[in-house]
Image (spheres, grey):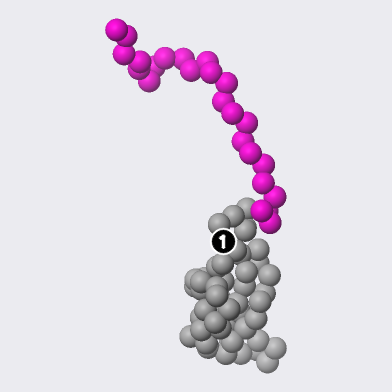
Amino acid sequence: MAIPSNNDNNTAPKPAPLAMTPEAFANLGAPQLAYIRPVQGPDGAEIFGIFSASGQQLGYAPERDLAFAAARQHELEPVSLQ
């Protein structure tokens, strides 16, 4: 009985990579996530933006804890980006 080795030539064709749109990739398994990150407010102060997986801004809050609470109130799971 022959034991295959890593030195054998692999002649089997490799499958072609699957193509996904950036939007489909962003939403893959993450439609319930909300990304929270610091952004600059209209007056120049640091506030916290709430974003969907596709990058769309959903809202903002003056404090990080409030942004997390707002995301949870809308049945989203907040994660922090810095």
Location of residue 70 by image quarter: bottom right
- The span shown in magenta is 1-24
Location of residue 28 by image quarter: bottom right
* Secondary structure mostly taken by the magenta-highlighted segment of the chain: loop
Q: Position of residue 65 (x, y in %)?
A: 48, 85
Question: Residue most toward the top?
Answer: 1
Question: Residue most toward the left?
Answer: 1
Q: Nearer the viewer, residue 58 or 48?
A: 58
- Residue plotted at (68% across, 56% down): 23
Q: Is residue 65 above or below residue 75?
A: below
- Residue plotted at (57% across, 90% down): 62
Q: Tell me the SS state at disc 1.
A: loop
Q: Position of residue 22 (x, y in %)?
A: 68, 53
Q: Nearer the viewer, residue 74 or 26?
A: 74
* Residue 6 makes an appearance in the image: yes
Q: Amino acid at mark 1?
A: Ala
Q: How many marks?
A: 1
Q: Is residue 16 above or below residue 13?
A: below
- For label 1, the crowd category at 10 Å Cα-Cα, with few meaning under 14, some 14 to 19 and many 20 or more, is some
Question: Residue most toward the bottom?
Answer: 43
Question: Label 1, on which residue?
Answer: 30
Q: Is residue 69 left or right of residue 31?
A: left
Q: Can residue 5 be found in the magenta stretch?
A: yes
Q: Is residue 26 above or below residue 17?
A: below
* Residue 38 makes an appearance in the image: no
Location of residue 35 by image quarter: bottom right
Q: Can residue 77 be found in the magenta stretch?
A: no
- Residue plotted at (57% across, 21% down): 13
- Residue plotted at (56% across, 67% down): 32
Q: Position of residue 2 (x, y in %)?
A: 32, 9
| Quadrant in which the N terminus is drawn | top left
